[in-house]
Image: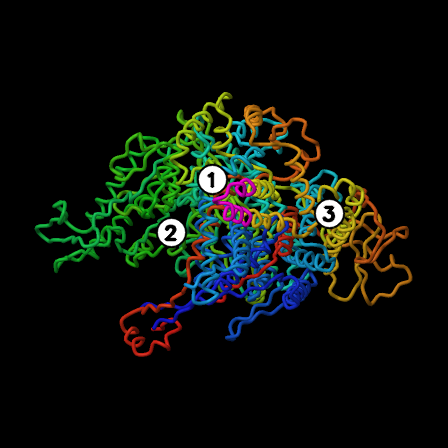
């Protein structure tokens, strides 16, 4: 039966950014995301109306998909940010907050849409040139000879996700594990094009975080306990293995879609099984010790192989096939009627059993150097564990990004305040050249600059959730927080060091509150003090892209003059 | 009785004005975007008039008719949909005003409204007829002399040379186009990218449309949308991107060159097709079609594997190491390929395979038993490429003799989200279409075709021979393809001037005096709405621009004189030379004052041919909507069962039937 519904006409809104309802919604989204930002961010519980699974999170990649809005503006921003997060795994909240602040500032300044867009784009250009330049004051070169900065970078990512509920030593432990796993995936001695290996992550619930571990090689689930003894009796040198990618259950799926007529008395099943056992005989003759199949193995064949002392693992799934071939050098076999060529066999150096609580796993050691490693993550309950797994995958991605661009940005809000100070200064010195090129008046330009810098500073400010004050020093323009409950005579006393930890307070330093009209100055580069190491580092590549995405999204939103909503 | 709705002129004007108000927000250089959500819930941004109009989901039949006209126009030229609506609304308003002032006085009409409608119809027809008859001549005489011609040769040589390429005509034309489609911030970047792409895809000794047509036809296979990155990450990459991943572990060795074969079918023979029957026997076994002796089903499947092995042996002897397949292959194929150190790419789309075949010169294999050397393509490399979330296959071709100058390259279009990449791709596609129609000569409409065939033939040949200077100047500038004019209302100002002049010359002769004058005046005044809207954020600038143009035209030329034409042709001759600096100010007098020159330099360029086609399309649409006088709301029964229901109660079926 055909079903034809009449298309209803669309709903139109003229100049949507002047609409109070839409502005309120955007403001609400900003408040929501702001409260999640940073290591002390507040968690959000997401649960649906049919009393389903409750998710606790503060990560943009989990939170944003949960926010469903009928407002296309929200969706526009949401998809932009999510696309960024799926490419770079970091700085999602940063991008979202910056974008929403830019929209708000542009609205408040009362600039014509086109002018605000041009100024924003110009200032973004200044920022990216500065960040990519050699003399950038908020960038740290990463040195792969020491893992110190890599661990700091990993720790910044992990500690910014409070849902994992990690103590300080646990955070450090996981950061070190993540860096170790990352380093294991970088092959050392292969000339030419380097292809990175893979970290296979497995999670075990109900154990302390400190039980987590990283192993070179692969760990596979052991379905039955009877093989454990066999594993122990194996000689510990090169063991031959075979890998099947076709099903060994006795079905012939590749014949086609026609009808097969079988006369009574002919048992095709047993004919096929005979063929499978032929295969088993060859494997036994070739002294294979490990038999792995992507799909199902016929129980009779399994029994046959086991009785000959071969360890059988079935249903490993497509995702583990590539790591398995890389690890063992085996080529997957899918032909059942021809003898297995000798070069299709792979080699495993050693096999042993690893136990994690109730889980028994078979550890395959690589024959030589291999870029495959397995990360076992343990945590006390399921929610924390699933977040920890997400966080570790993100950390791995962030660490991989450093291979392309070995730099990191100072964290703790220092990059934002530093950039804002730089932009304020730079735009003033170049104002006479810029204004005619942008086709706006000086006043408009200055308004635009102020809005842009305030948005940057706003991101630094929201790192503080406990009512403290955000400050900026007037020499290096780093970010400082001043706890709300500490009352001191001098401003500098209760400050200790700045957000990233590279600047320590001294009596000669001057501060200004963020988002107040402070003096305009050129931020001084840091004197390299060897004893001070940055405490917080952010991914350079991710943050740079996040900034571009935020400004471009804000510009898109500011450019919208009309809204058409399809109501079907 | 069917429900009948009489269409009055007021309704028509009202309907089109509503469309105009929607489109106006994104019109011109100061316009913005329209955000719309699709029925899937996906948010989309657009400044394209066509996109906006189709997103409205209009109900009124008249509005839908207008939108259809816009669509028809913009699929050809890729441009001008917003101006279309704007001009149409303005013309309708003017006609409405005139018709109300003096409706046809005749006793035949029953009411004042029908009389108005008939006057309006009459006027619209006359304007349309006038445009078909006179517009091309007016443009040739009144507008083209102030424009300049794009030279394809010039374009490509200049971009490859280092130097001030921003002065470039094609790039300027594209910048103006992208400005109106993507906004100020991205237009320079996109036009540069487009020019670069076209330079790479330039076929030697071919006319420009061929290369544009090629890009237009293959754009789907030539571009890769990548979301999550800012637009400035968009770039060109060498060779072709096949939008699939390797099905087998990708090649590690950097063997060069790489040999590839394309398969359209299954490598492993599937002898048992639907409807065929395989009989297994105990004693006398036979297979239905091949009558091959088989003992059991195992032998049958063993046979397909052996035949597959032969295919692979054959391929190995030809040195093939990459298999591109249109379908999904069996696990055995993948395993054998891995053992033979070949890599397989499955489920490649038809467009991509055909582009691959064109670029590599190898034909696809349909029967896997018959692989000949002509099926084997030679590639410089074949490697994985990570674009956004996806890993694709990146191939590059070895130069073959027939395409020495073409450097195959693909476009990576980056955007924040899927909606944006789609928007950019759309703009890109339309830009190519716009360029294509720019190269269409003015005055080649059906009615004029016979009159001009001779001239155009001459002209095209002269174009190919890089402009013989002694071609008669009038013909050359008249039908020259690729004519452009400074943007920002120049076309409209010039044409308005020409139309008014024509009107005064008409009023001298007696017979057509009244109608000719009125018609040209309506058209002339309607045209002014375009610059008026362009400068709508600052009305003073409109007046400034208008005065500047009028003084310029009065001071500088009598384009209808012979002296002018000859000088003009010499200027065109010069413009073919890349050293010519200011091609934008192509008027005859070299002593032109600096202010005019500057004015023309800072604005972009527009295509005269697109504008001309737009005007004709608007006028045609105008006369056709004024010819409609009644709307009949018919009812279509969806199926027999509901028809029986509707027969009994027609009044209740205003809404669509539900089943």
Using the image, determine if residue B476 lies above or below residue A65.
above
Q: Is residue B566 left or right of residue A540?
A: left
Q: Residue B607: horizontal and vertical position, in percent?
A: 53, 39
Inter-mark Cα distance, 3 to 2: 69 Å
Region in magenta = B503-522
Q: Earlier in the sequence, mark 3 or mark 2?
A: 2
Q: According to the image, label 2 marks what residue?
A: A292
Using the image, determine if residue B613 lies above or below residue B319.
below
Pointer 3 chain: A
User: Disc number at residue B437?
Assistant: 1
- Residue occupying the far front of the picture: B510
Pointer 2 chain: A
* Image quarter (top left, top right, bottom left or bottom right) of the C terminus of chain B: bottom left
User: Disc number at residue A440?
Assistant: 3
Inter-mark Cα distance, 2 to 1: 62 Å
Number of residues whose C-alpha sits closer than 10 Å to that of mark 2, classed few (under 14), some (14–19) or many (20 or more): many
Q: Nearer the viewer, mark 2 or mark 1?
A: 1
Whether callout 3 and callout 1 share a subunit is answered no
Q: Residue A233: horizontal and vertical position, in percent?
A: 42, 52
């Amino acid at each position: 039966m055909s079903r034809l519904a009449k298309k209803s006409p669309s709903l139109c809104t003229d100049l949507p950014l002047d609409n109070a309802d839409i502005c309120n919604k955007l403001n609400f989204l900003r408040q929501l995301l702001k409260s999640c930002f940073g290591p002390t961010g507040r968690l959000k519980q997401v649960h649906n109306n049919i009393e389903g699974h409750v998710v606790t999170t503060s990560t943009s990649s989990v939170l944003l998909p949960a926010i469903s809005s009928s407002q296309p503006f929200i969706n526009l921003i949401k998809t932009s940010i999510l696309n960024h997060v799926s490419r770079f795994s970091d700085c999602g909240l940063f991008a979202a907050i910056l974008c929403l602040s830019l929209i708000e500032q542009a609205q408040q300044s009362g600039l014509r849409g086109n002018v605000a867009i041009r100024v924003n784009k110009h200032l973004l250009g200044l920022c990216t040139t500065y960040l990519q330049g050699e003399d950038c004051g908020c960038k740290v070169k990463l040195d792969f000879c020491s893992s110190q900065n890599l661990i700091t970078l990993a720790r910044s990512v992990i500690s910014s996700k409070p849902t994992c509920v990690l103590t300080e030593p646990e955070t450090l432990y996981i950061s070190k594990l993540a860096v170790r796993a990352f380093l294991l995936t970088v092959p050392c001695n292969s000339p030419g094009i380097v292809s990175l290996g893979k970290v296979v992550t497995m999670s075990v619930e109900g154990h302390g975080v400190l039980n987590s571990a990283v192993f070179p090689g692969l760990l596979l689930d052991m379905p039955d306990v009877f093989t454990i003894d066999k594993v122990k009796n194996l000689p510990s040198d090169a063991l031959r293995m075979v890998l099947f990618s076709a099903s060994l259950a006795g079905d012939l799926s590749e014949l086609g879609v026609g009808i097969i007529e079988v006369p009574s008395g002919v048992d095709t099943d047993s004919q096929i099984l005979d063929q499978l056992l032929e295969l088993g005989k060859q494997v036994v003759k070739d002294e294979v010790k490990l038999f792995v199949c992507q799909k199902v193995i016929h129980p009779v064949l399994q029994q046959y192989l086991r009785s000959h002392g071969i360890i059988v693992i079935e249903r490993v799934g497509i995702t583990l096939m590539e790591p398995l071939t890389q690890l063992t050098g085996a080529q997957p076999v899918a032909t059942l009627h021809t003898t297995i060529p000798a070069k299709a066999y792979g080699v495993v150096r050693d096999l042993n059993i690893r136990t994690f609580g109730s889980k028994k796993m078979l550890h395959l050691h690589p024959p030589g150097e291999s870029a495959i490693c397995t990360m076992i993550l343990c945590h006390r309950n399921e929610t924390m564990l699933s977040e920890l797994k997400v966080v570790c995958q993100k950390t791995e991605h962030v660490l991989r990004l450093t291979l392309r661009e070995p730099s990191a940005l100072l964290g703790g809000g220092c990059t934002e305040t530093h950039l804002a100070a730089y932009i304020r200064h730079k735009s003033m010195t170049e104002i006479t050249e810029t204004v005619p090129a942008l086709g706006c008046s000086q006043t408009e330009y200055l308004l635009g600059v102020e809005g842009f810098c305030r948005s940057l500073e706003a991101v630094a400010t929201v790192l503080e959730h406990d009512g403290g004050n955000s400050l900026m020093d007037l020499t290096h323009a780093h970010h400082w927080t001043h706890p709300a409950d500490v009352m001191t005579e001098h401003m500098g006393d209760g400050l200790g060091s700045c957000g990233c930890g590279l600047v320590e307070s001294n009596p000669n330093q001057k501060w200004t509150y963020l988002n107040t009209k402070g003096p305009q100055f050129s931020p001084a580069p840091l004197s390299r003090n060897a004893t001070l190491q940055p405490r917080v580092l952010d991914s350079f590549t991710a943050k740079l892209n996040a900034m571009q995405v935020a400004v471009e999204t804000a510009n898109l939103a500011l450019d919208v003059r009309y809204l058409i909503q399809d109501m079907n | 009785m069917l429900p009948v709705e009489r269409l009055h002129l007021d309704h028509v004007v009202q309907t089109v004005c509503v469309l105009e108000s929607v489109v106006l927000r994104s019109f011109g250089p100061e316009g913005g975007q329209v955000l719309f959500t699709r029925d899937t819930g996906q948010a989309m941004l657009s400044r394209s008039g066509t996109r906006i109009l189709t997103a409205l989901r209009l109900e009124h039949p008249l509005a839908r008719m207008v939108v259809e006209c816009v669509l028809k126009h913009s699929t050809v030229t890729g441009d001008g949909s917003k101006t279309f609506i704007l001009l149409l609304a303005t013309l309708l308003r003017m006609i409405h005003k005139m018709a109300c002032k003096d409706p046809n006085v005749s006793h035949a009409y029953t009411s004042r409204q029908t009389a108005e409608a008939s006057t309006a119809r009459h006027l619209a027809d006359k304007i349309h007829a006038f445009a078909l008859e006179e517009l091309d001549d007016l443009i040739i005489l009144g507008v083209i002399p102030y424009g300049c011609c794009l030279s394809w040769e010039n374009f490509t040589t200049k971009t490859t040379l280092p130097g001030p390429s921003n002065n470039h005509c094609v790039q300027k034309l594209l910048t103006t186009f992208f400005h109106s489609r993507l906004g100020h911030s991205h237009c320079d970047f996109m036009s540069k990218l487009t020019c670069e792409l076209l330079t790479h895809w330039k076929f030697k000794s071919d006319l420009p449309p061929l290369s544009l047509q090629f890009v237009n036809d293959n754009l789907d296979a030539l571009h890769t949308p990548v979301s999550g990155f800012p637009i400035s990450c968009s770039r060109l990459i060498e060779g072709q991107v096949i939008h699939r991943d390797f099905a087998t572990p990708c090649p590690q060795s950097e063997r060069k060159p790489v040999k590839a074969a394309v398969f359209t079918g299954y490598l492993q023979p599937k002898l048992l097709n639907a409807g065929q029957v395989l009989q297994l026997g105990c004693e006398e076994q036979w297979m239905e079609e091949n009558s091959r002796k088989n003992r059991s089903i195992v032998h049958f499947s063993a046979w397909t594997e052996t035949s597959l092995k032969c295919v692979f042996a054959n391929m190995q002897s030809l040195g093939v190491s990459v298999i591109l397949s249109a379908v999904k292959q069996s696990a055995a194929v993948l395993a054998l390929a891995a053992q033979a150190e070949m890599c397989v790419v499955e489920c490649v789309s038809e467009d991509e395979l055909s582009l691959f075949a064109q670029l590599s010169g190898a034909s696809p294999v349909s029967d896997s038993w018959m692989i000949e050397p002509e099926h084997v393509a030679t590639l410089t490399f074949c490697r994985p490429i990570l674009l956004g979330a996806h890993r694709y296959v990146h191939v590059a071709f070895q130069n073959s003799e027939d395409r020495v100058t073409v450097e195959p390259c693909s476009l990576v279009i980056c955007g924040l989200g899927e909606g944006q990449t789609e928007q950019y791709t759309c703009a890109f596609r339309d830009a190519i279409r716009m360029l294509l129609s720019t190269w269409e000569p003015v005055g080649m409409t059906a009615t004029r075709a016979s009159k001009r065939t001779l001239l155009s033939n001459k002209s095209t040949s002269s174009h190919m021979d890089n402009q013989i200077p002694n071609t008669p100047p009038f013909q050359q500038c008249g039908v020259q393809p690729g004519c452009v004019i400074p943007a920002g209302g120049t076309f409209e100002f010039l044409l308005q001037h020409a139309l008014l002049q024509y009107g005064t010359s008409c009023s001298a002769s007696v017979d057509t005096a009244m109608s000719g004058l009125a018609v040209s005046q309506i058209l002339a005044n309607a045209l002014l709405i375009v610059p008026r809207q362009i400068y709508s954020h600052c009305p003073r600038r409109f007046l400034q621009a208008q005065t500047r143009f009028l003084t310029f035209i009065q001071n500088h030329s009598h384009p209808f004189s012979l002296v002018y034409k000859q000088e003009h042709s010499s200027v065109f001759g010069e413009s073919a030379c890349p050293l010519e600096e200011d091609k934008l100010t192509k008027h005859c007098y070299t002593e032109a004052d600096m202010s005019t020159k500057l004015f023309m330099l800072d604005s972009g360029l527009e295509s005269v041919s697109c504008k001309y086609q737009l005007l004709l399309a608007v006028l045609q649409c105008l006369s056709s909507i004024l010819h409609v006088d009644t709307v009949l709301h018919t009812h279509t029964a969806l199926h027999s069962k509901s028809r029986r229901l509707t027969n009994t109660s027609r009044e209740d079926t205003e809404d669509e039937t539900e089943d």
